[in-house]
Amino acid sequence: MSFFVLVYLDLDGGGGKRVQHGHNRNNEADLMEEVHLGDMHRMLPSFHQDREPAFAACLLVLDDTIRLNEWVAYHFTELPLSSLVIGLDPKSSMSSIAEIYSMSQRWSPYGLNIVVWPTDPFPKTYKYKTPQNHKRPQGSHKWRQETLVSSCTHHFLDKGEEEWLLLTDTDEFLSYNFIQSGENISSFDKDSIFRGPRAPSQEKRAADRVKALPIRRKALAFSAQGSTARTNNTILSFIQAQRANNASYDYFPSQSGCTRIVGLAYGTNESESTSSDVKKSEKLMTKRYQQHSKFFNDAFSKVMIELPKIKEDRNQLGLIGDIHNPFPRLCGWNGKHSSGQDFMGSVLKVSHYVGSIESWLERGFGNGTNIRKQDIREWKKRDLRGAPYTDRFDTRMST
């Protein structure tokens, strides 16, 4: 029988609905069934029970309860996620704050520790510097992002319980970057963002692609294994397998302690192959929205940090760039742009979703943050009529 996890997602705010979420290793959708929350622990992989060091994450949240429920369920299954700090934007509504606290309690019995931090200030802050061109006014959204990244990273270092720290947003889902048809590791975009004296050279990017290629091939085979072959078929167990192979460990995960992850944007256009009934009833944005921007776009990236590799003096955390390159002393520089990762040189991928109109308007009641308005007009602009969502990983995510 295929391995899958079904999780409780109260996506409608108090509705108590049971929603399927997980992955079906052999595409046997007819074998999937709903289970009550009280029965879910019987289906959880053993790593949650053993409580070995795994993944932590930090999220800054403004009313994102629809996205957040799905984000937590997905990463609990795929990483595995064991610890999460949620920093509340001060503009968050009382109803969303209540739902976030309720959600944190629902996950506690299953080995996921969720801590909610009120903002301004966070419980404990640390001094840091920023590059001259990244000065943020105190109280702004990006300043709050920087402060959360700093405080949250120190928080998990102090606790010393987790191995990895994922730094993304609630609309970004970590996965494997499977090899796509049409890839040519010898081809480089003339309009590359990698410019400037501290940007990676084309020669380095070419070398990285060669190193990443066999690991990406292994990722496809690894993810296709069923539960009988590997109970803990997660991103963490894939990393551990790479560490056991010394020939590959010199590239992934990064020896520096900061692994850059390329991003791929998914728009608001629903798959043409999806029936109208499914479109109306589907709550999970990772299933409903299946059109993405073109492959090989290097402009967007996030990072994950290997916490034990942070030096004891933590000087590597004393300079913060932005959410895309939070610690330049650890993660390195990208030239003129902090965000960016060579697509074919990235073993992992962050799938970035716009999501449903309901989730879009939930943030700040349609006003969004102070840097981006989130009304209906802006949501419609994000219709990406790109390549269809048919590669193996995306099928795995969507089942």
Image (cartoon, rainbow, N blue to C red):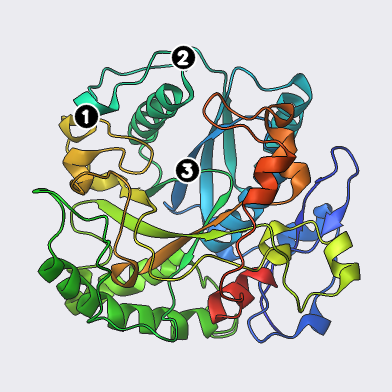
Q: Residue at x 40, y 17 (%)?
A: 124
Q: Which residue is mark 3?
A: 57
Q: Is residue 86 left or right of residue 316?
A: right
Cα–Cα span, label 2 and label 3? 22 Å
Residue 303 in the image, given as x and y percentages of width and height: 35, 50
Picture coordinates of residue 154 (x, y %)?
A: 34, 29
| Helix, strand or loop for disc 2 | loop
The residue that disc 1 covers is 319
Tell me what residue is drawn at x 64 percent, y 19 percent: 91
Res 106 seen here: no
- Vertical order, 115 against 379 (above or below): above
Determine whether 198 is above or below 59 in the image: below
**Residue at disc 3, secondary structure:** strand
In-front residue for pair 276/329: 276
Residue position marked by numbered label 2 in the rendering: 139
Q: Earlier in the sequence, mark 2 or mark 1?
A: 2
Q: Amino acid at mark 2?
A: Gly
The tag earlier along the polypeptide, 1 or 3, is 3
Whole-percent x, y for residue 120 in the image: 50, 12
Instruction: Answer whether labels 2 and 3 touch (C-beta < 8 Å).
Output: no
Q: Is residue 292 shown to the viewer in this render?
A: yes
How far from the left and from the top, in percent, is residue 348?
40, 65
